[in-house]
Amino acid sequence: MTDVASPTVRVSTRPAESRRDIGIKRRYAAERRFRAYGISAIVIGLFFLAVLLWSVVSKGYTAFQQTTITLPIEFSEKVIDPKNERATDPKRLLTANYPVLARDALVKQLGIDPKKRPLVKQANDMISDSVRTQLRDIVVADPSVIGKTIPVTLLADANIDSAFKRQIDLSVEESKRKVKDQQVAWMNELAEAGVLKKSFNTGIFSFGASSRPEAAGVGVALVGSAYMMLIVLVLSLPIGVAASIYLEEFAPKNRLTDLIEVNINNLAAVPSIVYGLLGLAVFVNFAGMPRSAALVGGFVLTLMTLPTIIIATRASLKAVPPSIRSAALGLGASKMQTIFHHVLPLAMPGILTGTIIGLAHALGETAPLLLIGMVAFVVDYPGSPLEPSTALPVQIYMWANEAERAFVERTSGAIIILLIFLVIMNLGAILLRRRFERRW
Amino acid sequence: MNIMSEAAVEKALDQKMNTVPLKMIGKDVSVYYGEKRALFDVNLNIRENTVTALIGPSGCGKSTFLRTLNRMNDTIENCRVTGRITLDEDDIYDPSIDVVELRARVGMVFQKPNPFPKSIYENVSYGPRIHGLARTKADFDEIVETSLQKAGLWNEVKDRLQEPGTGLSGGQQQRLCIARAVAVSPEVILMDEPCSALDPIATAKVEELIHELRANFTIVIVTHSMQQAARVSQRTAMFHLGNLVEENDTDKMFTNPDDQRTQDYIMGRFG
């Protein structure tokens, strides 16, 4: 039999041609390398974020606790109103020597001989000076307490607070620290008796500025920031959206609109302190608006936020598919109807995200507010945006300049509060986005 | 005998067709995009209750011509139209004509199905709402139902009118777009390659629909498919390089065109 090739199966015996080397291995290696770069960038970013959060939280969480001393205070008529003038002289109750009441109560509690002045003074130093206003408010609100003895929870002095939180190194020589051994002994005694204890610090949210750390809080700054956010939202959202709709949908494309566009993009990159100078020159000096007022701060932050909102809005308007516009126009909808019925609802998630990011940016802005005088020592809540107030980041800046140990934790505490607000705003942006996007 | 032969019927129909009134008349229509001229003095008449197919290779100006008929070119910057186009004697480029009203009379269906990202009901009722064609909920319900019926979609969607229009299949979406256009009771419906994004079955349904719509509407359709033009239209116009090459009855066009270029295009020699 001869070897005849089978007609049905033919296996190619031709050797595979050597292919041109196109570097497959190199390509895959490049891809792997690129992915590794990306992952390492993210890891580095997360690491620094973790360091930042850890440093802020570890320093700041103690700010949310405050040491208090609960004492039975005798509202002695002898101290408050020795000559019984309160019916005729309304100032009598306001100017009484209230700290004495707290001092006497503490001296009694500790069983110190009232005649030993240095000891009495040391004991008195354990109580915050803020008792003056605290006790005065109690008496003014209800003068019938005079002559009675009621338990009152007083703020401990900042040094005792720090010592009780173990932030003061007691191994240091006594003369070189602010807390004396005797005070530490009393502190431990009071703590054992349950009179002195740590509780949640509501004061940091409600107090205004104070030179005494235990009586300082971000209350006024929160109100100031809230006023400003409201003003920024009310002004910049409508103005920004209207400007973007006009530029994107109606304006002819010519030199002038190009120039406007370039300028808006540049304005977004202008350092915020320049806006502060502008606000100082225009709103305060030229228009004569009050300094330190949330109104001016709101205007300045509006100017600063507008470019961000306009850029985000224009981008999201551009992202609406042109087929939707054609569909509406083809049905005989006017340009206005097309935009307001179809384009704007579709662009809404992007607009809201841009707005909230702009607002969050404005909330954390400090520099322009310093220039318009919002770096003020404001004790009382502003009743309106025209009254002096501070802002949260400015309060942080001011506290960061203070030397006392108790202000260090309050600075970090205020940063935590600011970060929480920012997180809430960003969560709001995400939720709004989800909500609007669900409309297909 | 009374029974006419098939050929005789065709002939009678043809004669009838030649007496059909003209719905739209385009005279010396030229379109410029900036400096570039896209249409050269096109003279094309659209007959009433007739399907007119516009064919020709890509970039020949057939879509451009279609879009001049309801002034959709207005939305394109630098676009300029010269010549005269009338709709029932009204010059549609006359300043006294309101473009919103014109588009209510001359509806449009686009190449890619583009339902609004809203419910099926809202898609259909949007046109009547902005044109004030209905007042009560019942009126709207009726318009929506009849429009969807005319578009042959009613039975498929009647139980889910509140569901998003974008959730339908491609063919259904395109019929929804046709229903949306029909809902404002236009006189003319322009279709810009309405089947190019659809599969053969959906295409067949849309073609059938076009056939039925012809009874009530004047239809102008741009198509790339020669077979489609032959199937759905009674009149065909062939464009090439911005010129109208030939306009004729569809039967004649596909069997015995007057122009050599038409012959070549239909035979697939270019384009």
Image: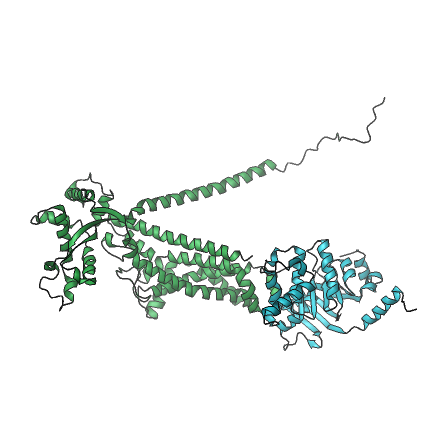
Chain colours: A green, B cyan
Tell me the residue at 26%/48% (across/down): A199
Q: Quick check: A85 left or right of B40?
A: left
> Disc count in the image?
0
At 68% across and 72% down in the image, what residue appears? B82
In this view, which residue lies farthest toward the right?
B1
Left/right of residue A72 with respect to residue A244 in the rendered view: left
Foreground of the two, A296 or B194: B194
Q: Position of residue A55 (x, y in %)?
A: 34, 44
Looking at this view, name the residue that lies furthest to the top.
A1
Answer with the quarter of the image where residue A439 lies: bottom right
Question: Vertical placement of B94 versus A319: above or below?
Answer: below
Horizontal and vertical percent position of residue A349? 50, 58
Q: Quadrant of the C terminus of chain A?
A: bottom right
- Residue B32 vs residue A424, the one in the foreground: A424
Above or below — where is A70 with respect to A14?
A: below
Would you say residue B241 is visible in this rendering?
no
| Position of residue A16 measured from the top left corner of the image (x, y, whole percent) | 70, 32
For the point 40% across and 56% down, the residue is A361
Quadrant location of the N terminus of chain A in the rendered image: top right
Q: From the viewer's perspective, is residue A196 above or below residue A386?
A: above
Image spot of residue A311 (x, y percent) = 48, 60
Displayed quadrant of residue A331? bottom right
Q: Is residue A30 left or right of residue B54?
A: left
Residue A73 sits in which quadrant? Answer: bottom left
